[in-house]
Image: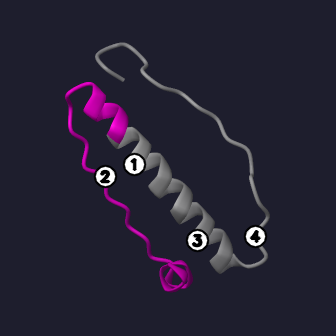
Amino acid sequence: MLGAHVLKTWSATQTSIALSSGEAEFYSMVGASSEALGLKAMTRDYQDELDPWLYVDASAAIGVA
C-alpha cells in the first residue's frame, strides 16, 4: 500500500505437488524468493527501496538450495 491506495494484489493456486516435506519447503522458499524480488522491483519503480530478507529454518530446503 502507498498511503491508502492498494498497489498490487494477487492470488495463486498450487502449481505442483511435492512428494516430500523437504521438496514442499523448497518450493515455498523459491516462491517466496520470487515474490520478494518482484516486490523489490516494483518498489524501485516508485523510488522506494525495499531490501527483502528470507529466513528459512528447513534444513532439507536449505540443503537442496
Q: Which residue is disc 4 drawn over? A: 18
Q: Nearer the viewer, residue 63 or 1?
A: 63
The region drawn magenta spans 41-65
Q: Amino acid at mark 4?
A: Ala
Q: How far apart, in angstroms, are the residues tagged by discs 2 and 1?
A: 8 Å
Residue drawn at the location 26% of the way across and 34% of the way down: 44
Q: How far apart, in angstroms, are the residues tagged by discs 4 and 3?
A: 9 Å
Q: Is residue 64 magenta?
A: yes
Residue drawn at the location 63% of the way across and 79% of the way down: 22
Q: Earlier in the sequence, mark 4 or mark 3?
A: 4
Under circle 2, the secondary element is loop
Q: How far apart, in angstroms, are the residues tagged by discs 1 and 4?
A: 23 Å
Q: Is residue 60 magenta?
A: yes
Q: Quadrant of residue 3?
A: top left
Up the image or down, 19 lies above or below 39; here it is: below
Q: Which residue is disc 1 drawn over? A: 37
Query: Residue 55, how many percent across, how many down?
Result: 38, 67
Q: Nearer the viewer, residue 21 or 45?
A: 45
Q: Amino acid at mark 1?
A: Leu
Q: Tell me if mark 4 has few (under 14), some (14-19) or many (20+) residues whose alpha carbon lies within 10 angstroms of its own.
A: few
Q: Which residue is disc 3 drawn over? A: 26
* Callout in the foreground (1, 3): 1
Q: Earlier in the sequence, mark 1 or mark 4?
A: 4
Q: Amino acid at mark 2?
A: Pro
